[in-house]
Image: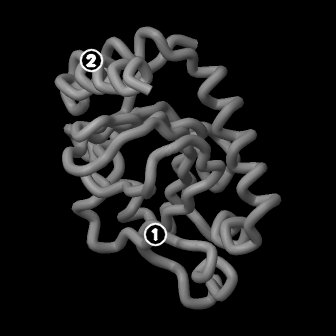
Amino acid sequence: MRVPALAIVAATFAFVPGCANDPLTQANAANANAAQIADDSRAALSSLFAQNPGARALGKKAKGVLVFPSIVKGGFLIGAQGGNGAMIRDTGVISGYYQTAAASYGLQAGIQQFGYALFLMDDEAYRNLNRSGGWEVGSSPSLVIVDKGMATSLTTTTVDRGTYAFFFDPRGLMGGLSLQGSKITRIHPQP
């Protein structure tokens, strides 16, 4: 059991120092493939819509959906998470590529993979995403995390503003999914 814990610590320390730095964003963009991110994001959103009627209903009204199909989170006392995604506008067009990254500390150990989608319900939410320097998810007062119970009672007649987040496909051994402290930055991957 000692070797996996040491591997998690090593991976965490390799990832955490640059989590919100511009060089990491640029290096990530240089190694990312736009077509693959677009394909993975569309497939993940399609799967989410098939499994969750609340997400499907919101998707019909959203100005755009920012989909991160695969976020990797790992840590041992100090943790980090990150991944790439794409903005799918209400027209179905990919309008940009993004990276999400976060660091955390506290009682935590393990590694986990999951995806999430942010449903941007109005033009203001879309503009906030594209502010210079990126968008800190936890700083948005209009962000609502939709859990399974809320998703079943969610009606689109009352939802027309703000940002709604859905988690999907969690795998691994690490407790808790959170967006607190996540920073989303636009990237320009290779075609």
Instruction: Using the image, determine if residue 159 lies above or below residue 184.
Output: below
Identify the image quadrant of residue 94: top right
The residue drawn where x is 71% and y is 55% is 48
Answer left or right for 109 relative to 39.
left
Residue with the mark numbered 1: 145
Say what amino acid the circle numbered 2 marks.
Ala
Element on which disc 1 rests: strand
- Placement of the C terminus among the 4 image quadrants: top right
Instruction: Using the image, determine if residue 142 lies above or below residue 178.
Output: below
Give residue 13's position: percent from left, percent from top: 23, 22
Front in this rendered view, residue 50 or 35: 50
The residue drawn where x is 60% and y is 49% is 170
Mark 2–mark 1 Cα distance, whole angstroms, equals 29 Å
Say what amino acid the circle numbered 1 marks.
Ile
Q: Classify 10 Å Cα crowding around label 1: few (below 14), some (14-19), many (20 and above).
A: some
Give residue 152's position: percent from left, percent from top: 69, 82
Give residue 179's position: percent from left, percent from top: 36, 55
Instruction: Using the image, determine if residue 76 lies above or below residue 66.
Output: above
Whether residue 51 can be seen here: yes
Residue with the mark numbered 2: 14
